[in-house]
């Protein structure tokens, strides 16, 4: 599987590759996510060394939560999105990840129309943002 840019477009390209896999191949990816999410991410995205250092420093409880949610959505071939807000440019912030935070949110959309059956769609949204 190809490595992708760590960006919203890169995530969508990765998901397109993953969702083309057979069920058994996708199950192997899900198992790898649950076994070691950090390594799975590093093997799927082109990260800068500072991004890898930040990833390695993230609290393990958050990593487990992120891995579990990601695995569930990938196993079900559901939508996942990445929002990367631009940091306030300061040298310290860029080098040390100062003020950076990551939020994971599940969004549910429900739709009904008289001419179509009831539909629901869930999206897992990862947001990388910066506190002022």
Image (cartoon, rainbow, N blue to C red):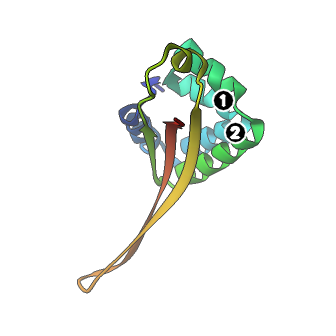
Q: Position of residue 69 (x, y in %)?
A: 62, 51
Point out the residue furthest to the right here. Answer: 60
- The picture quadrant where one finds residue 7 is top left
In the rendered image of this protein, does residue 26 appear above or below residue 39? below
User: Which residue appears at 57% of the width and 23% of the height?
Assistant: 43
Q: Position of residue 90 (x, y in %)?
A: 48, 18
Query: Disc number at residue 123?
Result: none
Q: Earlier in the sequence, mark 1 or mark 2?
A: 1
In the rendered image of this protein, does residue 79 appear above or below residue 89? below
Q: Could you tell whether 116 is left or right of 64 in the image? A: left
Q: Residues within 10 Å of mark 1 (few under 14, many from 20)?
A: some
Q: Nearer the viewer, residue 74 or 129?
A: 129
Q: Nearer the viewer, residue 90 or 65?
A: 90
User: Which residue appears at 64% of the width and 38% of the height?
Assistant: 33
Q: Position of residue 32 (x, y in %)?
A: 66, 36
- Residue under circle 1? 38
- Residue under circle 2? 63
Q: Nearer the viewer, residue 35 or 109?
A: 109
């Amino acid at each position: 599987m190809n490595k992708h840019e760590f960006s919203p477009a890169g995530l969508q390209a990765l998901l397109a590759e993953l969702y083309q896999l057979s069920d058994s191949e996708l199950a192997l990816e899900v198992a790898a996510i649950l076994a070691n999410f950090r390594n799975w991410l590093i093997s799927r995205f082109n990260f800068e060394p500072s991004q890898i250092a930040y990833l390695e420093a993230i609290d393990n409880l958050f990593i487990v939560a992120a891995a579990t949610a990601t695995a569930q959505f990938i196993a079900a071939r559901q939508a996942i999105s990445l929002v990367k807000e631009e940091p306030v440019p300061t040298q310290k912030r860029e080098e040390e990840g100062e003020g950076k935070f990551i939020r994971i949110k599940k969004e549910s959309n429900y739709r009904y129309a008289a001419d179509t059956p009831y539909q629901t769609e869930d999206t897992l949204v990862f947001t990388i943002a910066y506190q002022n």
